[in-house]
Image: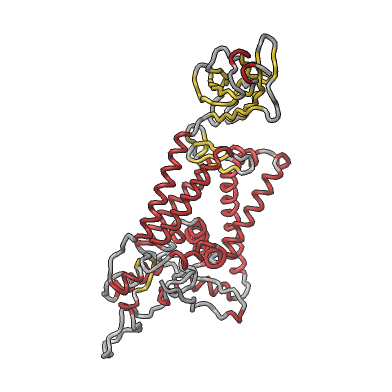
Amino acid sequence: MQLTENLSRPQAASNSRKWMYPVIRKGKLYEYRTWLSYAYLVMFFAGPFIRISGQPFLLLNVIERRFVLFGQVFWPQDFFLFVLAMLAGIVCIVLFTIAFGRVFCGWICPQTIFMEMVFRKIEVWIEGDAKKRRKLDEGAWTQEKVFKKSAKHVLFFLVSFLIANTFLAYVIGSETLIRIVTEPVTRHWSGFFSICIFTVVFYLVYSQVRELVCTVICPYGRLQGVLTDKHTLVVAYNYLRGEPRGKRSKKEEAPKGDCVDCHLCVDVCPTGIDIRNGTQLECINCTACIDVCNHVMDKINMPMNLIGFYSEEMIRQDKKPSFTGRMKAYSAVICVLLVGLIYFIAQRSDIDITILRSAGMLYQEQPGGYISNIYNADMINKTDSKRRISLVTSNPSIKIKYIQAPGILDKEGAGKAVFFLMIPTKQIRSMKTEITIKVMDQHKLLQTINTTFIGPVNGED
């Protein structure tokens, strides 16, 4: 689909920031976005405190390398699962963009939700509509302006502080966050400074940077020109129906298009573009222009959706949306990745144990006619309950002599074990012997591990 420059921007020679004063016009799509945003905000602020089987709903503790998704604990040993999940997520985003453009940006992206549904509403509540906000910014610093600006930025900072605390709870856990908040600051300097830094970052993003996150900083927007094509459904202006645009007059003989050139689609755009100039990288598909245009069409008794979800193919050839071969290919890749991810998650054990023979060590002769090898076992308990671990060999004649016994593994804890495997010399038939070790939790079999035993050939040195 054709990409055009944003003609509504000031010339580059001015080197000045153009502040956006989008008009808020409510419509059916705006109401849908509002309710979706409320649901998102409830989930965002409640997420760190939701528990599933005693585990957080979502935790991304990079510091301790502990991750929890939907109540399931993942450790660095499960990193390949994150790789699969990340690949599946990336392909899903690509497929979604090919099919629907940047709808994610306008409807689901946290940046847009917080900016338009939280901070923008605070701004409108304190400073008024778009005209009043512009007039206030361009006017002198009166007592009213000082009061309104101070009130707005204090609220912005408080909301940013709340977001920073919630964001940090997803990283360090809600219990740790509560301790940082309730206990003396001197005991949690790193946590205190983290909250301060995140608060300042969020405050600057939503009070100063704003739509530049979407139009300049975010790399996803730049992918639109690569991923979209003539089959992609995006927020678009039906130029065949709308042109030539202009005010309607009964005296004019030449018929005009449905666009009355009211400029409202530009006034409501949070990034300041004119959707009539074609699909642009700055368009986040927030659908504000659809709502306001439909309101105008309703007033002049014209069909709805002069601006709507269209593909270039739909506008030019009047075709229905199609599920293209490109979309089918990406869908197949997603299915393969999801099937693999589900399989590996289902095969994932609650207790992760790795048993390795000590490197650089040969066999040892033991009293009583035994040959021994020394082994190290690393154990991780991925559950929220203690486990009493013991090791048992499948062959009763093979003995285990502990240097460091496995013992009890605390919940979500790690442990080590060091032990000798001792085999009667007469039972050794080759230099390498396969040994099966059973990992037991009291009388419950958790895992079966195969390892290699090194000994003298035919029991001789």
Q: Nearer the viewer, residue 69 or 262?
A: 69
Residue 25: percent from left, percent from top: 40, 67
In the rendered image, the vertical position of residue 228 relative to residue 96, given as above or below:
below
In the rendered image, the vertical position of residue 21 relative to residue 353, given as above or below:
below
Residue 311: percent from left, percent from top: 35, 68
From the image, which quarter does the C terminus lie in? Answer: top right
Say whether residue 129 is visible.
no
Total numbered badges shown on the rendered structure: 0
Residue 455: percent from left, percent from top: 64, 21
Which quadrant of the structure image shows residue 422? Answer: top right
Which quadrant of the structure image shows residue 458? Answer: top right
In the rendered image, the vertical position of residue 322 relative to residue 57, given as above or below:
below
Seen as rendered, the residue at the extreme right is 186
Task: Name which residue lies at 61% across and 44% down.
Answer: 62
Task: Name which residue lies at 47% across and 37% down.
Answer: 345
In the rendered image, the vertical position of residue 176 relative to residue 428, given as above or below:
below
Residue 108: percent from left, percent from top: 45, 56
Q: Nearer the viewer, residue 4 or 55?
A: 4
Say whether residue 456 is visible.
yes
From the image, which quarter does the N terminus lie in? Answer: bottom left
Which quadrant of the structure image shows residue 432? Answer: top right
Q: Is residue 167 left or right of residue 346?
A: right
Q: Is residue 243 left or right of residue 58?
A: left
Task: Name which residue lies at 58% across and 79% down.
Answer: 12
Q: How is the image coloured?
A: secondary structure
Task: Name which residue lies at 67% across and 9% down.
Answer: 368
